[in-house]
Image (cartoon, coloured by chain):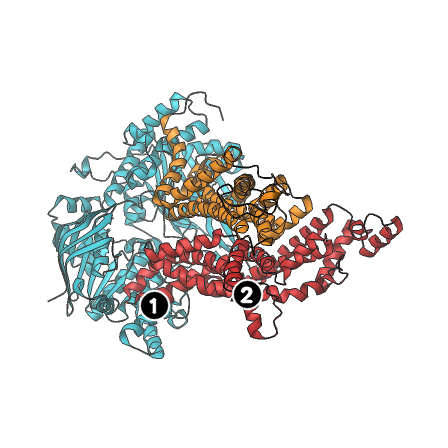
Amino acid sequence: MTAFVIKRLAFAIVTLFGVLTIVFFIVRVLPGDPALVILGDQANQASIEALRARLGLDQPLFVQYLDFLGGVVVGDWGVSMVSGRPVIQEIMNVLPDTIELTVVSLILGVVVGVPLGVWSAIKRNKVPDYIVRIASLLGLSLPAFVSAILLLMAFAIQLRWFPVISSGQGDTIGARLRDLALPAINLGLIMAAYITRVARSAMLEVLNQDYVRTARAKGLSFAVIVWRHCLRNALIPVVTVVGLYLGILIGNSVLTEIVFNRPGLGKLIIGALNQRDYTMLQGMMVIYTLIVVLVNLATDLVYGLIDPRIKYQ
Amino acid sequence: MSVLSVEGLTVSFRSEGAWASVVRDLSFEIGGGETVAVVGESGSGKSVTALSIMRLLQEGVSKIEGKVMLEGRGDLLALPDETMRDVRGAEIGMIFQEPMTSLNPVMTAGFQVVEALRRHRGMDRAAARAEALRLFDLVRIPDAKRRLDQHPHTFSGGMRQRVMIAMAMACRPKLLIADEPTTALDVTIQAQILELIRELQADTGMAVMFITHDMGVVAEIADRVVVMLRGDKVEDGPAAEIFAAPRVAYTRMLLSAVPKLGSLDGSATPRRFPDLKGDPDSADPANEPDLRADEILAVDGLVTRFDIRGGVFGRPVGRVHAVENVSFSVRAGETLALVGESGCGKSTTGRSILRLIEPRAGAIRFDGRDVMAATPTEMRDVRRQMQMIFQDPYGSLNPRKTVGSAIGEPLRVHGVAHGEEVEAKVVAMLDRVGLPPEHALRFPHEFSGGQRQRVCIARSLALDPKLIVADESVSALDASVKAQVVNLMLDLQKDLGLAYIFISHDIAVVERISHRVAVMLLGEIVEIGPRDAVLANPRHPYTQKLISAVPVPDPARKGTRRPLLADEIASAVRPVDWTPPERRMVEVGPDHFVMES
Amino acid sequence: MTVLPAPRPAYWRRSLAAIGSGLLAAFNTNKTSWVGLGLFLFVCLLAILAPWIAPYDPIDQNILFRLKPPSAEHWLGTDYYGRDTLSRILYGARISLMIGLFAITSAMIIGSFIGMIAGYYGGSVDIVIMQIMDVLLAFPSLILGLIVVAMLGPSVANLVIAISLTAIPPFARIARAPTIAVKEREFVEAGRALGYSNPRILFGHILPNILPEILVMGSLWLATAIRVEASLAFIGLGVSPPTATWGGMIREGFENILDSFWLALFPSLAILIVVFSLNLLGDGLRDAIDPRLKGEE
């Protein structure tokens, strides 16, 4: 198990290193001189040179690269070209909102998706199975912004149950939850659609295994077989898939935050794109990939906990 | 009073809207302390019968009619589901064929036994655990206390089957149903498991329903026999009578097709299996190798090892010594059998000779060429004359290619034939293995197992090879088909002067087909010599153990009990720094060598 | 190897047909796949015929007919500039389908090739390739799309590049797993024993066996690509206005959501129909193909 953990950790570090390298070069090959972008066309040559020196752009590429890597490690992610505040500070301001949204959605997705998937598998080719399958297929056919708009139209504009704009800054827990409700339902149901499908197919496969027959031959009841013998085996692919779908979850969270006008990384990255804030974009890519790599590491480790075959390696 | 009495059992499956019966009007009884073997080839309905008794068939697509009377319970088929669950695991225990997949991989072995105890015997956690430990000891699992808390993947196949038996025995069932419990196991492990079942039966007086295709196993264990053919019972009676005087042709065929160890005593050359049409054995011509012929293949000091990588940096942490200092030679028209149990390195030896796996050391001379020194291009040419036939005739044919293109492709690749010639050659090859030309248009899944293996043989013959390495090529086939394919191989050898390396765990088939036998253990040849000498007069202790474990279809031997053992062969995995000891072979008879111990 | 001038014998043609019949059998196992395919082909037909069947020019502005609800003249209403929504949806289909098809076809070819090489050769080749793919996978696809389009500028070609870049690593994974599974089958070893070269085994024997699965995943990823394209357009990184794109239309409709809900609703339904039809198609096929790779029969 220790070797497994260290190995996964090593892979994560290698991946992170590769990711940071790509981020660095993407930003460097962006068309246009950042100094020119910041100061505008009318700036004189001297002030441009001065700013280039301040941003470290006059250094050789290799030195810039090392500076960048070092900066990422110590938390110096540069200064926003627009607001002038440190990038890491701007990100940390809104990161909790995004994390709150995605974690709640993920929990919602698992709580709804796993039981539905299991139920659908047990009732294979019967009415409940068809309904669950069509519903989950619809769920993953709707782009997140479309479902968000539909939810907004129905529950905020027509029924007025929830605020149209969720500031996410509510003072009381109740207010915060009201703000969170629609965006989380939107993201959570889409996630549930994905998880339902994986849980269903994993469960179908597990139900066909020889050890299920053994369990039946032991005289166990169907419920015990499903929940005790099958579920844990079926969860193994579900955990892997949750890690794989993280990218989709992040993309959807950006769209959801835009539609509900909710503070978070989504609004930050759109703002940075519109204003060509390169240092901010660089920081955004670092934080997104960091999240992805860390969550994948976590799912790998959870995988190791569920599947005893890994523990003995 | 019988424990189980099956009356007029008919089982049907629904396929494409229609019901098709797979077991028809089957009746038999099993008394207390009695073992009834249900025998038949694949598709005879023997496993379906077992699952029907347990009511484990999938509902909706299956239909069970008739009566299954269990002592004290009445008709099982009439019981409500709830009550039936109380019967399963408590009054009837069951073991299955596949020990590798029949245990839940995420639960400890002990828990899976404890679960049955708590379900049926209402024990608390501690009592159930103590009882599970007792059961582990009962089925002779070494180091039982530690093993309770380990997961199934750390157990060998034989040990897993012991766990399954412990689970089935947990509630002292009246009836044990064993569905091909030893088919997936090595022959020495099979002997242990059979002995264990007999011992447990003697202690508890339970009834045993033993399902198998192997008449040798039947002779070892059964008091009475039920013979099944495509869903019908064709014959039943006491084992001794069935073996001595089978009444129906099918039973006679089963018995005659079953390889018998010792049936070629005193003969040096291979002989065809008796023709099922009734020609006497003795009329078969023998395959005489040309003793003046040169050695077509000479292997000297072959070594193949695999590193096991582990740890953080993937450094080798151990090494599998799959083939260690193996030397032998084969003449044209001669068959050398490589025998041994799983993991002994016999398959790796075969693959190393063709360099499908790269050997680490050793010399291979084939038809005057140095195989080890051949470049990849030269190697392709070598492989033309050195062919391989695999165990799984379906797996070794590309499911998306017709049989015709499977046979034709090597001809085209090696530029042996062009255009129309290819088609003519394909037809000729099919004819050679006894298949009609129109079969070229078919896909592998349209053939039976035996036919597929014929196609594989045709494919390898197309390139006019001099040597064929046959890796467990008949092991997956039913006895009657097995005999036909072996006969075909013998005919081809006689007509074409082929040399065979016949890799098999099945000693009884080896006896029929081989001129010489090499016995492998942990990557090394421990004994090699003329077949008659090795099999009739084994000198190495392992060869002796192996041959005594082979079940012989002779119920008279049933009385001979073996000691209850649980020892298994150590693995060929060694530490990285392990150096194999120096070995010396001693000649104990003409051309008969044994490793000095 | 010599090239054969002679016609391929009948059994050779049957072998080729087997790949197609594998897919056909999958279609018939799961009838919903036919529904999905029919729906998708219908949308494709509408997109191809858009110049002839669209009632109005999609970018023709008409200030007199601004923000009109659905009516006899404008079945699906008009937008802020008085443009006909139905016509814009029909033309928008061309953009969505073109970008999706080009992006996924190229990603499928490149990704599958990479995945097959990694799976077949294994060892350090596999480790290096899959590590690179993992690095690419660490970028959430929408974020990578955002950055690439923002960098290169919003044009059809750049959107194709951005979307296919995000789909290459998944296809590498999709192709790699069955390649490894098929590689372990004895017929591949039999091929080596018969002296076949690696390219012949890889593309002549393994590819036909994994192709149905790749094509099925292709249809599912086409659905994803169309969704991502719409999302990018919604964010403002689609093909530049005034060209009609579904995502762009929803973006404009969202600004008028309180009084003219149809502006956002109809293009949303269009996306839903296309993506749903593709998911229906791919999902049914996958269900049918899956057991075949495990059990073979």
From the viewer's perspective, is the residue at label 1 or at label 2 nearer? 2
Q: Disc 1 on helix, strand or loop?
A: helix
**Residue labelled with disc 1:** A224
* Residue at image coords 18%, 44%: B253
Look at the numbered discs 1 and 2 and tell me whether their residues touch, using CB distance below 8 Å: no
Residue situated in front as seen by the camera: C270 or B114: C270
Q: Is residue C164 left or right of residue B400?
A: right
For badge 2, the amino acid type reads Val
Classify residue B105 as left or right of residue B430.
right
Residue closest to the eye, A227 or A110: A110
- The letter of the orange chain is C
Instruction: Write down the chain letter for disc 2.
Output: A
How far separated are the C-alphas under marks 1 and 2? 30 Å
Residue type pointed to by label 1 = Val
The cyan chain is B
Q: Is residue A270 above or below residue B592?
A: below
The residue lying toward the viewer, choosing from B572 and A248, is A248
Q: Position of residue A117 (x, y in %)?
A: 41, 59
Can residue B71 be seen?
yes
**Left/right of residue A181 with respect to residue B131 in the rendered view:** right
At 65% from the left edge and 65% from the top edge, which residue is drawn?
A: A94
Labels 1 and 2: the sequence-earlier one: 2
Chain drawn in red: A
* Pointer 2 residue: A103
Quarter where residue A124 is shown: bottom left
- Residue lying furthest right: A46
Report helix, strand or loop for mark 2. Answer: helix
